Image (cartoon, rainbow, N blue to C red):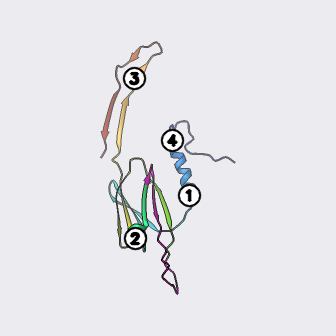
């Protein structure tokens, strides 16, 4: 049975990469460790907060590759401790987020077992173009392409 895509319409052009990203997200395992929050801190700013108790700065890594933000953690094993009960997880993790084109990571802070990663979304721009139409015989309507970009608040 073939899968029907919502982006398979002939009216939606150039969304192939977007569709592949959605497929990758759908196939990703739904693991709950470490727990995280995503919050809007300003109109065009977001913050991802991960609960990483027990991890130090040296145990954590944040990588942004293309449009994928990956946070990973791995603690060094401590051989000298003898546990009578070990209930605090020290397992490694890898958590990934797909972020939109143009979103920037502005900083990361580890504070009291919480890793805060701040993101800034670009302000949306509206682009309008007047496209020159040429006839097959070489004649054209209009001499230039008029491009106007307007910032939206």
- How far apart in space, not on screen, are marks 1 and 2 (Cα)? 27 Å
Residue placed most toward the observer, 9 or 64: 64
Between disc 1 and disc 3, the foreground one is 1
- How far apart in space, not on screen, are marks 4 and 3 (Cα)? 25 Å
Residue placed most toward the observer, 133 or 97: 97
- How far apart in space, not on screen, are marks 4 and 1 (Cα)? 20 Å
Q: Is residue 80 magenta?
A: yes
- How far apart in space, not on screen, are marks 1 and 3 (Cα)? 45 Å
Mark closest to the chain's N terminus, 2 or 3? 2
Between disc 4 and disc 1, the foreground one is 1
Mark closest to the chain's N terminus, 4 or 1? 4
Instruction: Evaluate if marks 1 and 3 touch, with contact meaning CB atoms under 8 Å apart.
Output: no
Disc 3 packing (10 Å; few <14; some 14–19; many ≥20) = few
The residue that disc 2 covers is 56
Q: Report the predominant secondary structure element of the magenta stretch.
A: loop
Q: Position of residue 24 (x, y in %)?
A: 55, 52
Secondary structure under the numbered disc 1 in the rendered image? loop
Q: Pick out the residue farthest to the right.
A: 1
The residue that disc 1 covers is 28
Q: Position of residue 5 (x, y in %)?
A: 59, 45
Secondary structure under the numbered disc 4 in the rendered image? loop
Residue placed most toward the observer, 102 or 123: 102
Q: Is residue 97 magenta?
A: no
Mark closest to the chain's N terminus, 4 or 2? 4
Q: Which residue range is magenta in the image?
A: 64-88
Q: Quadrant of residue 112?
A: bottom left
Mark closest to the chain's N terminus, 1 or 3? 1
Mark closest to the chain's N terminus, 1 or 2? 1
Residue lying at 36% horizontally and 34% vertically, measured from the top left: 128
Examine the rendered structure and indicate whether residue 80 appears above or below residue 52: below
The residue that disc 4 covers is 15
The residue that disc 3 covers is 132
């Amino acid at each position: 049975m073939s899968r029907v895509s919502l982006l398979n319409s002939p009216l939606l052009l150039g969304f192939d990469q977007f569709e592949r990203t959605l497929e990758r997200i759908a196939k990703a395992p739904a693991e709950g460790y470490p727990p995280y929050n995503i919050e809007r801190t300003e109109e065009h700013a977001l913050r991802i907060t991960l609960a990483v108790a027990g991890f130090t700065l040296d145990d954590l890594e944040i990588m942004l590759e293309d449009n994928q933000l990956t946070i990973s953690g791995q603690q060094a094993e401590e051989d000298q401790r003898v546990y009578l009960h070990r209930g605090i997880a020290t397992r490694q993790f890898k958590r990934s987020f797909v972020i939109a084109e143009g979103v920037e990571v502005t900083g990361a802070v580890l504070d009291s077992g919480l890793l805060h990663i701040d993101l800034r979304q670009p302000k949306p721009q509206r682009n309008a173009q007047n496209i020159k139409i040429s006839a097959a015989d070489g004649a054209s309507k209009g001499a230039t392409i008029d491009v106007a970009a307007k910032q939206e608040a």
